Amino acid sequence: MATEDEGRPRGARLVLLILLVAQVMATMDNSIVAVATKTIKDDLQTSGAVLQLILSGYTLMFAVLVVTGARLGGDVGHRRLFMVGLTGFTASSLLCGIAPTAGTLVAARLLQGAFGAMMVPQVLSVIQIVFTGSARARAIGLYSMVLALGVAAGQIAGGVIVSADVLGSGWRAAFLVNVPIGLALLAAAPRYLPGHTPSSRFRPDIVGILLLAVSMGAVVAPLVFGREQGWPAWALASIAAGTAGLVLFVRYELRLGARGGQPVLEIDALRPRGVKSGLLACCILNFAFAGVLFPLTLHVQNGLGYTPLQAGLMFIPYPVGFAAVSLTWTRLPKRFHRPLPVAGLLVFALALAALAVVVAGGWPIAVVSALLLLAGAGMAAGFSTLVEQTAATVGPRYAAALSALVSTGTLLASVVSVVVVGGVYLATAENDPSRSALGLSRSLWVDAGLLMLGFLLAYRTWRLSTRVSAGTAPNGDAAEQVEAVAAPGNPPPGEVEVEPATGPVEESSAPTGARSAPR
């Protein structure tokens, strides 16, 4: 098979396009719907509690099932599970768009979240399989951009779609827009996405799946619904029980792996040095991003009187800055790649600190836009590079586990941020719009402070990864683990064999392109 230079096999652009468009649909969905909540409430005559289910049911189901989706993709086939998830996501989007009642819409949103959890983890996993070298770095940079900016882009797209009111569809167009896109992807995916033959030794970790699902649900449900209900006792008890369940889950998975079983989440993916600090820094970046987006959106609408569309357009400098860095950082000399996340987190923190000072005294739109541009660039320099470096450290062996950890960690960080940082804003300005600027300023200070912790974690990741690459990690652990991840002669128990896709990407015959398991 002909291949292109630097680790990108022939047909890889189409593979990446299919994957990223699917990721965009899933990531943007919630923020598009958030813009439409008022019209949904008026049209379907829903209560506040039902509206919260419509908005957050997707997030809840996604969080509960995403780790399971990642593991099943590795066991039964990434392409197969991607297709199942995409089919279900498209069908449930149609059901959302034609829902005659609020109850039907809630059920369809839950289905969307469940099928999204099957589809989304396969994106990073397939990128890890198809690309190598600098081509992988560029692909992961684009993936990171889509993952981080989908929420902001969704707000802009949601405002445009709902305001356009195409054929009188109103809020329904926010869901129906997924249908033609999903159908186009379903037509292309079987031809271009690589597939593999499932291992005959596959044994589903039923106990781990159930324990994780129940524990994640117990943590996420009160985070999503607790504030609206005044944080009742059940919410706090549920979070405590869910946290204990997650600790039990980790211990169970470690024991299962030690016995030669097939855990739903391979905790060993966290063992190489720098992975834990890198993932935690990624979570902090997403915490700060949600901690900017949520109070800023509330401020410009409640404090400044912007429409939803104006609010979305006001945020454009942020994704512009993010996209500019995400698309260009791989062209920098390689000696700058490892320290780039450290600089990015520092720039992000300083931009938000400056924004906190500026908004407390007014709303100079040019200054605000410039600082949002800088903040977006700082986040991209941190997030895109950290994801790429972490992926390179764990290698294709743990691609599914890393995908699950990134998806779950960033989602939980965003949910917690809305509770914590959103709580700071609402405690200041919920009953007094005149204090909105003060509430936003306080929220931004919280974000900036946490980003400084992320800065320290990114610095630690940089130092550890530098030691590993130089082969001087303490006791040789990290270097050995990174070698073991990539060593072709060391397949893990239950490894799967890769079979060629029916289209241009043929994993089994590309020495510098797609990766395949040893046969």
Image (cartoon, rainbow, N blue to C red):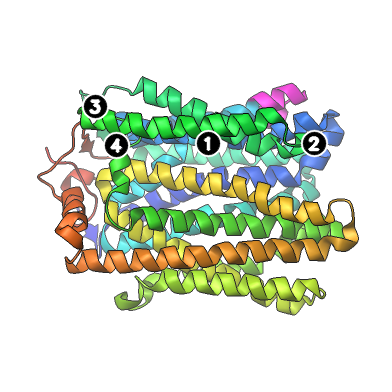
Asked if the magenta segment contains residue 98, the reply would be yes
Q: Earlier in the sequence, mark 4 or mark 3?
A: 4
Q: Earlier in the sequence, mark 3 or mark 2?
A: 2
**Residue type, mark 1 in image:** Ala
Q: Confirm or deny contact between disc 2 and disc 4 (CB under 8 A).
A: no
Does residue 293 appear anywhere in the picture?
Answer: yes
Q: Which quarter shows the C terminus?
A: top left
Give the image location of residue 466, x and y in percent: 27, 69
Tell me the residue at 19%/54% (across/down): 477
| Residue 63, disc | 1
| Residue 195, disc | 4
Tell me the residue at 56%/33% (across/down): 240
**Residue type, mark 4 in image:** Gly
Q: Earlier in the sequence, mark 2 or mark 1?
A: 2
Query: Which span of residues is magenta-colored?
Result: 95-107
Q: Earlier in the sequence, mark 2 or mark 4?
A: 2
**What is the spatial separation of the Cα atoms under label 2 and label 1, in whole angstroms?**
24 Å
Residue that mark 3 sits on: 261
Asked if the magenta segment contains residue 297, the reply would be no
